[in-house]
Image: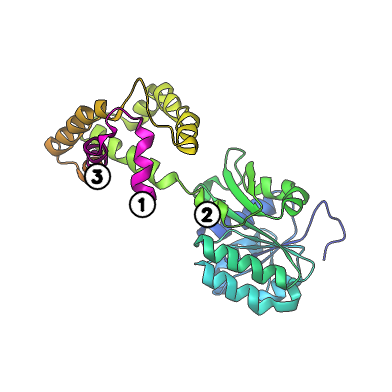
Amino acid sequence: MSENAQTPAVAVLGLGEMGSALATALLDAGYRVTVWNRSEDKAHPLVAKGAQPAATPVAAVASADVVIVNVKGGAVAADLLRASGSELAGRTVVDLTDGSAEQSTTTGHLVIEHGANYLHGQIMTIAPAIGSPDTVIFYGGDRTTFDRHEALLRTLGGRATFVSPDPAVPVLYGIMWGLLNGFLHASALLGNAGLSIRDFTQQAEPSLTSLSSLFPMLANEIDNTEFATPYGALKHHLPSLDDLISESHTRGIDTDLPTYTRNLVAGAITAGHGHDSYSRLVEHFSRK
């Protein structure tokens, strides 16, 4: 392993779109990187940039202080790490593989049992944004390990954020798909009307920023289970949702997403929560 703790040697297991982006960001930052992939051809562009190829996952692990795993599914990640066995001892494993919270916990136990430190990360972007100072990656696991390798982790995403000593927690931070779907539905409406989506994002930026600023208030309501509100109550959302559904239908845009939302709001109103905040709908998703 590298003797210089400030510039650890890194192994990247898995060279798909995201894994290759992770390895590239490390190479660009001057790290010594060893790469492995089941199909060797994916390693060739990285080797051309200075990476060292490994014939096996075990060989890649043996070369590194920090082992980054980004493969197809948590079960595959666990199998690769299990096969490395005693070679994991004394190293740090950063698992950036998608999977369930339960799988990240299981993999964490496996890694720790073999004498390694473990972090699980949830990447909140697409491959081209890896290495950007604005890219968010949430981490859970050993805080001391995160602090020790923070510079490396910020090379992958400038807004690397430690959220919990529980490695399962970052998985639960994956909220971007609901937000993206709302934006894409709006984009479909605008595009149908011949409007520029780029212009919309620029002109509506203050409104979008204002909307995200509501999240702390909603979070406080949910944590305290206090939903009554003097303004913006659920009953006032229903007409706007009806308008959105009608507009979507008229323009031939899929109505499933706004209809689903309307049904949530209408159900809450029927249950007597018409004067409550929008945050009351969390109870539908909780299903307790």
The disc, 1 or 3, on the residue closer to the chain's N-terminal end is 3
**Which element type, helix, strand or loop, lies under badge 3?**
helix
Amino acid at pointer 1: Arg
The answer to whether 268 is drawn above or below residue 74 in the figure is above
Density class for disc 1 (Cα within 10 Å; few <14, some 14-19, many ≥20) is few
Amino acid at pointer 3: Tyr
Looking at the image, can residue 174 be seen?
yes
Residue under numbered circle 1: 287
Say whether residue 173 is left or right of residue 34.
left
- Residue 14, position as x, y percentages in the image: 57, 66
The disc, 1 or 2, on the residue closer to the chain's N-terminal end is 2
As for residue 261 lying within the magenta part, the answer is yes
Which span is picked out in magenta? 260-288
Q: CA distance from mark 1 to mark 2?
A: 20 Å
- Residue 185, position as x, y percentages in the image: 28, 40
Residue under numbered circle 3: 260
Q: CA distance from mark 1 to mark 3?
A: 16 Å
Closer to us: mark 1 or mark 3? 1
Amino acid at pointer 2: Val
Residue pictured at 73% horizontal, 47% vertical: 150
Residue pictured at 71% horizontal, 75% vertical: 59
Residue pictured at 26% horizontal, 35% vertical: 272
**Which element type, helix, strand or loop, lies under badge 2?**
helix
